Image (cartoon, rainbow, N blue to C red):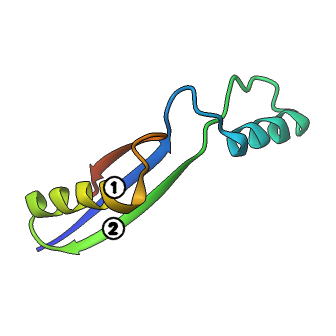
Amino acid sequence: MVTELEIRVGLKEGVADPEGGNVEKALELLGFSQIEGVKSAKCYRITMDCDLDTAEKEAEKMCQRLLANPVVHDYSITVIN
């Protein structure tokens, strides 16, 4: 069984986000005046050949071991199919 997951990794509240800040400034310079804030995040779509339960457990391990730093990042795991 093929399972596809989306893992979204972003900075925790209160951690400086210079990339988001730069995008916010650029959008304002382009005339988008209603911008209240921009936060950056990375999105990984991972396809695994295993059942859903195993895929979610493996994705959790991936986040803990490589994709996210628990000191500065929050992450979410979403099943795509």
* Count of labels in the image: 2
Circle 2: is it few (<14), some (14-19), or many (20+) Cα within 10 Å? some
Which disc is residue 7 wearing? none
**Residue type for callout 2:** Ile
Quarter of the image where the C terminus is located: bottom left
- Check disc 1: other Cα within 10 Å, few if <14, some if 14-19, many if 20+: many
Q: In the rendered image, which residue does mark 2 sit on? A: 46
**Which of the 4 image quarters holds residue 49?**
bottom left
The three-letter code of the residue at mark 1 reads: Cys
Q: Secondary structure at mark 2?
A: strand
Q: Secondary structure at mark 1?
A: helix
- Position of 35 relative to 70 (above/below): above
Please give the name of the residue rendered at 58% of the width and 33% of the height, measured from the top-left corner: 15
Task: Specify whether 20 is left or right of 6.
Answer: right
Pick whichever of labels 1 and 2 is earlier in the sequence. 2
Pointers 1 and 2 in contact (CB under 8 A)? no
Position of 31 with respect to 14 (left or right) is right
Q: Nearer the viewer, residue 31 or 16?
A: 16
Residue drawn at 69 percent across, 22 percent down? 36
Residue located farthest toward the front when viewing the structure as drawn: 71
Say which quarter of the image contains residue 25: top right
* Distance from the alpha carbon under mark 1 to that under mark 2: 12 Å
Please say if 14 is above or below 46: above
Which circle, 1 or 2, is nearer the viewer?
1
Q: Quick one: quadrant of the N terminus?
A: bottom left
> In the drawing, what numbered circle is on residue 63?
1
x, y percent for residue 39: 61, 37
**Direction from residue 4 to residue 67 in the image, left or right:** right
- Residue 51 picture location, percent across and down: 9, 66
Residue 23 x/y as whole percent = 76, 43
